[in-house]
Image: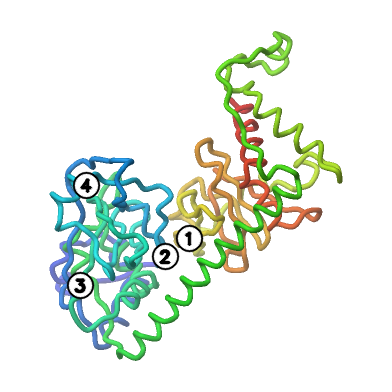
Amino acid sequence: MQYSVVNYRDLEKGSLRFDSEYYHPQNLLLSQTLKSKGHNQIDDFAFVTDGIHASIDFDENSKINLLSAKAPKENYFDLSGTGFISKVQDEKNKRTRLKENDIVVSTVGTIGNCAVVDKSILPANSDRHVGIIRIEKSYQPYFISSFLLSKYGRFQTLRESTGNVQLNLFIYKIKEITVPNLSQNFQKLIQDVCFEAHILKTYSVKLYSQAEQLLLSELGLLDWQPEHQLAFVKNYSDTQQADRFDAEYFQPKYEEIVEAVKKYRNGFDELGNLVKIKDRNFTPKDNEQYKYIELANISSNGEINGYTENFGNELPSRARRKVQKDDLIVSSIEGSLESIALITEDWKNALCSTGFFAVNSDKINSETLLVLLKTKVGQLQLKKVVKEQF
C-alpha cells in the first residue's frame, strides 16, 4: 500500500483538492523535482484559450479542418476522424482559428495529447474539447509540446483533470502547468529532433503504402474494388446453414474476396491455421505499473500513438490482454476493425483491452500480417467474421 501524509497547511495553494490521488507519492515527487529548479507557468509566457463552444456547423465542401480532442496525438495530428467547419462559422470564430506554431492540447478523452500546428493542416479551427497554447516569448513550441508529453507534463495534465463521468482539463489549469527554464540551445535541439521525426514519419507512411500496393499486386487484387449490391438472390438453404437471413451478411462482396484469394497461384490457408490467438486473460498485480493500450491509441497506419500507465488495481477491468514483441493486436469491435497494430519492443509486457484479439505466428511474419489485415482483403473478411458473431 502506498500513502502520503500531507499537513493541511501544505495543501497545494489554490488547488482546492484534498483527494488522495492528487497527493499520490509519485505526483508529489515529480512536483517537487520540477519546482526545485527554475520554472515558469504556461500563463507566464503564452496566451491560452479553448475552441468553439457552440455546436459545429460541418461542411464537406469546406477546406477548413476542424480539430477536436481526437486530432492531437503525440507531437503529430491524425486528421482521419475529423471533418471540415463551414466558412461562415470559421469567420464568426476568429478567436479559435489556429495559427502556425499553436500547440493544441486534448482536454477530454486522452487528456494531454498535444501537437504543434504547421502549415500542412491550415486553414483550421477547433472545438471546445481542446486547449490552444500560443507562445508569446521565451519558449519553442515543440519543446513545450514534448515536455507536455513527457512524464513531467503528463502527470500535471492528468492530476489537474476533474470530473465524475468524463474527466476534463480546464483552461485555467493548463495556464498553471509548470514548465522548466531550459536554454534556448537545448530547446532548439528538442525542436530539431521533432522536425526529423516528422520527416521520418512521412517517409514511413510512404513505405507502408508501397508495402500495401506490393501485397495487393502479388495477389492480383490491386485494382479490385468491392461492390455493394442493393439486390441479390440467395438460396433458403444458405440462410438455414448460417442461421441468418439479414441481407448485409450475405453481401456477394464477402464471397468475391474469398474466391479471389483462393485463386492465388501459391495457394492459400485459413488464418486460424496460421496464427495463434492469445485469448487467456491476464490479471495485473495491484502495485505494479503497466502500459495500457486502448482502441483510441491505434493510428490509421498501424502505430500505437499513446497509452495509459497506471497501477494494476487502477486499470479498467477490460485491461486483461498481455502482449509481447511481434504480437499483432486486432480490434474485434465492428466499426473499429481497422484498428490493428504491431507490438514492438517498446510495448513488450503492455496490456491491451479485451476488445482486441492478440495474435502471433511462426508461419507468416507480423509485418505482412499487419498489412494484409488492413487491406480490403483482410478488412472484408474481418467484417464477415464479426457479423457471424451476432
Task: Return the disc, 2 or 4, that comes first in the chain's sequence.
Answer: 2
Q: Which residue is mark 1?
A: 305
Name the residue located 33 percent from the left edge and 62 percent from the top edge.
112
Name the residue located 19 percent from the left edge and 57 percent from the top edge.
96
Name the residue located 65 percent from the left edge and 32 percent from the top edge.
385
Task: Return the disc, 3 or 2, that comes first in the chain's sequence.
Answer: 3
158 over 320 or under it: above or below:
below
Number of the front mark, 3 or 2:
2
Instruction: Kindly indicate the quadrant of the structure image that contains residue 57.
Output: top left
**Mark linked to residue 74:** 2
Give the x, y percent position of residue 162: 25, 55
The Cα–Cα distance between marks 3 and 2, rounded to whole angstroms, is: 37 Å
Crowd band around label 3 with a 10 angstrom C-alpha radius: few (<14), some (14–19), many (20+): few
Q: Are marks 1 and 2 in contact (CB under 8 Å)?
A: yes
Please state which amino acid type lies under the numbered disc 2: Glu
Q: How many marks?
A: 4
Nearest to the observer: residue 320 or residue 135: 135
Give the x, y percent position of residue 15: 17, 65
Q: Which residue is mark 4?
A: 87
* Residue at the limit of the structure toward the top, as seen here: 236
Number of the front mark, 1 or 4:
4
Crowd band around label 2 with a 10 angstrom C-alpha radius: few (<14), some (14–19), many (20+): some
Task: Return the disc, 1 or 3, that comes first in the chain's sequence.
Answer: 3
Task: Return the disc, 1 or 4, that comes first in the chain's sequence.
Answer: 4
- In the drawing, does residue 49 fall left or right of residue 212? left
